[in-house]
Image: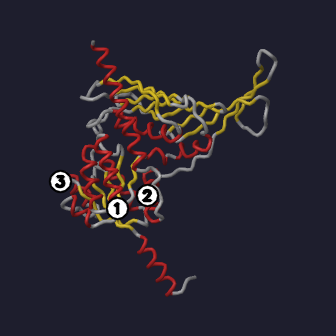
Amino acid sequence: MADAPEQITIFAQILKDMLKIGVLGAGHLGKIHLKCIQQISQYELVGFYDPDMATAQQVEATGVRCFDTVEALIEAVDVVDIVTPTVQHFACASKALNRRRHVFIEKPIVATPEEASRLIELADAAGVKVQVGHVERFNPAFIAAEPFITKPKFIEAHRLALFNPRGTDVPVVLDLMVHDLDILLTIINSPVAKVSACGVAVVSSTPDITNARIEFENGSVANLTASRISLKNMRKMRIFQDDAYITVDFLDKKTEIIRIHDEETSGYPYSLSFDLADGATRQITMELPEIHPINAIQTELESFYDSIIHNTTPVVSIHDGVRVLNLAYDILRAADSSLKKMAQ
């Protein structure tokens, strides 16, 4: 057991490494961030800011300090967690970066590619860390699947959601599809060659359902569908490569690895053998990688702390967020062009 002087030294080091953090935006997702931060011992939650008085009073009643302005909160912290509507991301982030605060910013990183370019300039000048909240990178189902993903040739993803007015300030591509775009750009190491898309605005003023086909220079192809007017929730991705068919269920946290072997093998609890016309035998096996349950939002906030303390690149960097946004806008432009052709 440590003696008193050693205990004091350990406690002093803990205090030295602790980072003060504040949250901008206390809506549905902001409240989740506040709860997660309170579970992370390396952060000191200083408070939050939200312009809606009713929301602010509700959250303040839980014991979290409410600041009067964005600027006041930024001055009081080391890290700013931005969980505002997308249209406010750039204004909040630029204020934080101008004060040289580390910034965690929810997806999509900002509202436009022009804002994204400016944000990179501000971050470089500030010399601080910026992480983007593409939370599916921390989904335990994807973490379990990632070691098996080598050279994907075809990817199909469906991200469907029941209608919710929250998030309709942006097209469904920026609201939902960006999650799959981030995963796509993570597992395919090749520039995008061509984008085709079609989108339809059904209940809001921007597309509520969009399908995109993305072709990469290395020959890989992805077909993505995102909808916020579905009758059920679905977040699935299927990945096809030479040696495997991989399914990732982001919603139910399940992963399956299906392979075909030239000859029968042992050690697979889930397998099926079959004979071909030429008399050869093949075996289909299915692996179910172990899923380790985690709180993905809490984990991404913990990883951001680690990148600041150890001066490493955040898992989802500002450049990752900008690449996703630029691809999302390529899809939006392709969808708009498709609609104009149909109207002729």
Q: Name the residue under label 2.
A: 304
Residue 53, disc: 3
Q: Please, is residue 280 above or below residue 287 in the view?
A: above
Q: Image quadrant of residue 287?
A: top right
Query: SS for tag 3?
Result: helix
In this rendering, which labeled residue sits more in front, label 3 or label 1?
1
Q: What element carries label 2?
A: helix
Left or right: where does residue 146 sit relative to residue 57? right
The residue at which mark 1 appears reads as 79
Residue beneath the point at 40% across and 38% down:
178
Q: Which of marks 3 and 1 is nearer the N terminus?
A: 3
* Frontmost residue, 294 versus 178: 178
Name which residue type carries label 2: Phe
Choose between 134 and 231: the one closer to the eye.
134
Callout 2 crowding tier (Cα within 10 Å): few <14, some 14–19, many ≥20: many
- For image coordinates 46% across by 56% down, the residue present is 313
Instruction: Classify the position of the N terminus by image quarter.
Output: bottom right
Write down the quadrant of residue 272 in the picture.
top right
**Residue at left 43%, top 62%?**
308
In contact (CB < 8 Å): disc 1 and disc 2 = yes
Q: Which of 271 and 212 is in front in this view?
A: 212
The amino acid type of the residue labelled 1 equals Val
Q: Where is residue 121 in the image (x, y as percent from the top left)?
A: 32, 52
Q: In this view, does 32 lie to the left or right of 277?
A: left
Label 1 element class: strand
CA–CA distance between discs 1 and 2?
A: 10 Å
Asked whether disc 3 touches disc 1, contact meaning CB atoms under 8 Å apart, the reply is no
Callout 1: 10 Å neighbours few (<14), some, many (20+)?
Answer: many
Instruction: Pinpoint residue 115: horizontal percent, then vertical percent.
Output: 28, 44
